[in-house]
Structure formats: structure tokens, C-alpha cells
Image (spheres, rainbow, N blue to C red):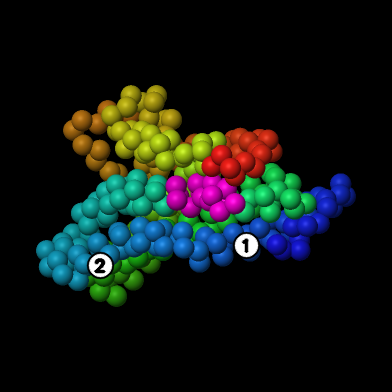
Amino acid sequence: MNASLAETPSLGSSWPLWRRQIVGILRLEIKKNFLSKRALPMYLLAAIPVVILMMLAVFDRGMQRGVRTNLSQAFIVFSNLHEGLILRTVIFFGCAWIFMNLFRGEVVDKSLHYYFLSAVKREVLVVGKYLSGLIASCTLFLLTTIGALFFLLLPRGLQANLDYIFDGPGWAQIVDYLGITILACIGYGALFMVIGLFFRNPIIPALLVYGWEWLNFLLPPMLKKISIIHYLHSLVPVPVNEGPLAIIGEPTPSWIAISGMLAVTAIVLGLASVKIRRMEIQYGSE
């Protein structure tokens, strides 16, 4: 255990101490998130979109011609892939795996009591673990998005891509997709950490959330807003066609989507702090 976790807080130095404790938790947790056996499914999941686009860029001549001659259509395809595969599947299940294991994995491994016995506030433990999961998920899924974009644009050649990025709309679109990826990790991460804390078997609640997110396009406009994918969908730079059965709703303005997601994340983390404060270790019942 990091020495900083064992210090006893005082009123005059609470914030500096909490910062040091969070850093200590991050050092421990980031190593677990990236190097433990549980990280392997996360890596395999994150590689799926990159491998798909790599295969298309290398072997599909029709796709190569399409990207070279009609980049706008190529980005429509990418936007659908980003929302349908990267956001709704890769990031969803990746965040479920990372964040539900932050506490549930410790209970299964019978190691959570080491944190509870240390002189660290449980709210600080929630923040430290959440940030560690956020760093892991953002790092991995940003690389997924960047890798997918790289292979999408690969058939155009270096000079054409440089012109598109620096003299055209490319840079703004790329930043938008990366920002949506980060926001997805923030929202889904907080949600799944709470699910992992409140449910002994978090798989069923996670699947229910997955179904709700996938069926969002069929929901009436008011119910659409009770989902993460709605706000992410509102931010995409290239609109995604949800199909003929979709119930059309007005997209949420960007500033409301972003600030609302951050506010809900803060509330969810508050719920996690309340839960962890009352949590007792009962390994025998797991």
C-alpha cells in the first residue's frame, strides 16, 4: 500500500492530503487496469473496430476508391460505425468491464478490505478509482477511435489527408469524435461503477441498460433524454440516420448535452460515495 494512503487527515491540510491519496490510489489502480489479467478482454474488444477498418483499407478496393473519390460518404459510413460499434458496443462493454470491476473485482479477489483499513476517506477512494478507470478507458478507446480514423483515411494518401485535416474540416471532425469518445467514457464509467457497487450480480442491470440504449431510437422524445447515447448522438459532426422506424426527436444543444452529462456524472458519483460510506465487507456472501 502506498505510504500516502496511510496518513491521517487534518482539517488544515485536507485538500493536499486528499490529492496525495488520490495520486497514490491512481498509481495502484492504473497498473491493475492496464496490466492485470482482467485487461485482456478490454484490449481485444478495443481492437475490433481498428481491425475491421484496417482490413477494409488494405483489401477492399471498392472502399479504397470510395474514400478517395467521395470522402463525405466515407465519413457518413464512419459516423455510423462510430456510433453503432464503437460507442454502443466497444465503449459500452469496455466501460462496463473496467468500471464494474473497480470495486466488484476487489470484492471477488477479497482485497477491498485493505483500502477500507487504510486511513483514506471512502469518498476519496471513489474519486481515485473512478479517475483510474477514466484514464484507462479514455486512453484505450481514444486509441481505438484514432486507429479507426487512420485506416479510414489511409487510402487517400498522406498529402490528401494533410490537406483535409489542416486546410479543410478534418481537424474539427476528428476533435469532435475524440470528444464524444471521452464523454462516453465519463458517462458510462460513472454509471457502471455505481451498478458494480449497488448490485451483487451487475450483469443483469448492465444488459438492461444496453437494451435501453440500443432501443433509444424507438423511444418517444421525452424518454430519449433518459439515456447516454441520446446526448452523444446529439454531438456527432456527421448526422447518423437511425432508420425508417425511428421516432424523430430534436437533438439536444451541445452545451446542454455536455454540461448535463457532466452534472449527471457528478450526481452518480455522489450516490457511489454514499453507498461506499455504508458498505461493509462480507466476502463470505459473495
Instruction: Identify the secondary structure beneath mark 2.
Output: helix
Categorize mark 2 by other alpha carbons within 10 Å: few (<14), some (14-19), many (20+): some
* Main secondary structure along the magenta-highlighted residues: helix
Image height of 218 relative to 72, above or below: above
Toward the viewer: 123 or 217?
A: 123
Residue 42 left/right relative to 56: right
- Which comes sooner in the sequence, label 2 or label 1? 1
Query: Would residue 38 be counted in the magenta stretch?
Result: no
Q: Which residue is mark 1?
A: 28
The dot on residue 54 is 2
Nearer the observer: mark 2 or 1; the answer is 1
Instruction: Identify the secondary structure beneath mark 1.
Output: helix
* Viewport quadrant of the N terminus: bottom right
Toward the viewer: 165 or 215?
A: 215
Quote the CA–CA distance across marks 2 and 1: 34 Å
Residue 146 left/right relative to 257: left
Q: Amino acid at mark 2?
A: Met
Residue 147 left/right relative to 35: left
> Quadrant location of residue 263?
top right
Toward the viewer: 209 or 250?
A: 209
**What segment is highlighted magenta in the picture?**
95-110
Which residue in the rendered view is the most extreme toward the bottom?
A: 158
Image spot of residue 148 (x, y percent): 32, 62
Residue at point 64%, 42% (across, down): 281
Q: Amino acid at mark 1?
A: Leu
Note whether residue 82 is visible. yes
Circles 2 and 1: CB distance less than 8 Å?
no
Residue at point 18%, 59% (across, down): 70
Note whether residue 276 is visible. no
Image spot of residue 272 (x, y percent): 61, 39
